[in-house]
Image (cartoon, helix red, strand yellow):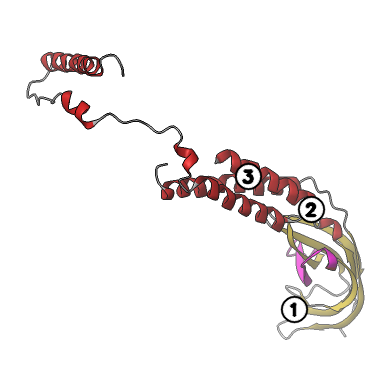
């Protein structure tokens, strides 16, 4: 502690510890936030249902989505990533999860909305199992905090049946 | 220094949480580090209120350090020598300082 450089070294090294404690505490307090998410989604329209050249079923559709994710945001939330998946069962796979649409919510002001969206990614099956298939729409969300671990959760939105015939 | 930094961290966390702003917390803590640096880094005069008084060099010359005699023998004899040498150290010291220390 006999020169400025020594003291600066000590100061900077020690200052990391309270910083780490603050960030850990911020992440710890996030665990006490119990969010109540309200979301609905229905199939707005099935725009195209066809069989690809290689034999796999492909569906293009549009979704009517409304959600209120405001309760997910705390002071430690950087952004929230939401995506809607179609989930169904086939003889080959006990669970098929296909992402249809995703969105990044940057802040609380944009966390409540209702809109009709086309699918960003087509629903393509590993084979030809989609005719008349009962499909569940599930909303997943990943909360990305400013410090700490990412929180993941999901909720079921609705189910629908695909038509029996290609269009 | 440690106390100041921890106090600033606690304050920054409390204010940041109350305001609900992560950025505010980091800014307050950064300000706290700079303030602590201003207090602790420069050699302020008030750190030197109780300076150590070193012995005069002439005092040291009058009580020369005992020279370590390198020994090639091993075992009990050497151990004896070390003990004798340590005693001589104690003697010199008490004699040299005249009990003032």
Which is more toward the observer, A45 or A66?
Answer: A66
- Circles 3 and 2, Cβ within 8 Å, touching? The answer is no
Q: Is residue A9 above or below residue A79?
A: above
> CA separation, marks 3 and 1?
53 Å
Rendering coords of residue A26 (x, y %): 71, 48
Q: Position of residue B30 (x, y in %)?
A: 61, 54
Residue B35, horizontal then vertical, whole percent: 59, 50
Left or right: residue B44 versus residue A89 is left
Residue A88 part of the magenta segment: no
Q: Is residue B64 visible?
A: no
Residue B13 seen: yes
The subunit carrying tag 1 is: A
Provide the secondary structure element on which disc 3 rests: helix
Kindly report which numbered mark, 3 or 1, lies closer to the viewer in this rendering. 3
* Magenta span: A89-109
Q: Quadrant of residue A135?
A: bottom right
- Above or below residue A166? Residue A6 is above
Q: Residues within 10 Å of mark 2 (few under 14, many from 20)?
A: few
Q: Residues within 10 Å of mark 3 (few under 14, many from 20)?
A: some
The verdict on a common chain for dots 3 and 2 is: no
* Residue at (78% x, 71% y) in the render: A103
Of the numbered discs in the image, which one, if any, rests on residue A56? 1
Chain ID of residue with mark 3: A
In the image, what residue occupies the spot 83% across and 49% down?
Answer: A34
Q: Which residue is mark 2?
A: B19
- Badge 1: how crowded within 10 Å, few (<14), some, or many (20+)? some
User: Which of the 4 quarters of the picture holds residue B27?
Assistant: bottom right
- Quarter of the image with the N terminus of chain B is top right
Q: In front: mark 1 or mark 2?
A: 2
Residue located 90% across and 75% down the image: A115
């Amino acid at each position: 502690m006999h020169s400025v450089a020594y003291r600066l070294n000590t100061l900077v090294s020690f200052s990391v510890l309270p910083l780490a404690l603050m960030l850990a505490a911020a992440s710890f307090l996030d665990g006490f936030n119990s969010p109540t998410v309200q979301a609905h989604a229905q199939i707005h329209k099935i725009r195209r249902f066809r069989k690809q050249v290689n034999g796999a079923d492909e569906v293009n559709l549009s979704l009517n989505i409304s959600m209120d994710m405001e309760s997910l945001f705390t002071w430690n939330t950087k952004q929230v990533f939401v995506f809607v998946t179609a989930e169904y069962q086939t003889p080959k796979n006990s669970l098929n999860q296909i992402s249809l649409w995703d969105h990044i919510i940057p802040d609380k002001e944009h966390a409540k909305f209702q809109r009709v969206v086309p699918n960003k990614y087509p629903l393509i099956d590993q084979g030809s199992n989609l005719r008349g298939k009962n499909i569940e729409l599930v909303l997943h969300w990943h909360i990305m905090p400013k410090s700490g671990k990412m929180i993941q959760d999901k909720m079921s939105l609705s189910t629908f049946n695909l038509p029996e015939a290609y269009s | 220094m440690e106390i100041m930094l921890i106090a600033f961290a606690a304050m920054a966390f409390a204010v940041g949480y109350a305001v609900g702003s992560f950025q505010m917390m980091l800014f307050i803590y950064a300000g706290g580090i700079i303030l602590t640096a201003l207090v602790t880094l420069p050699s302020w005069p008030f750190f030197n209120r109780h300076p150590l008084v070193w012995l005069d060099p002439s005092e040291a010359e009058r009580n020369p350090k005992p020279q370590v005699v390198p020994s090639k023998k091993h075992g009990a004899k050497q151990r004896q020598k070390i003990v004798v040498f340590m005693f001589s150290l104690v003697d010199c010291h008490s004699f040299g300082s005249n009990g003032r220390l």
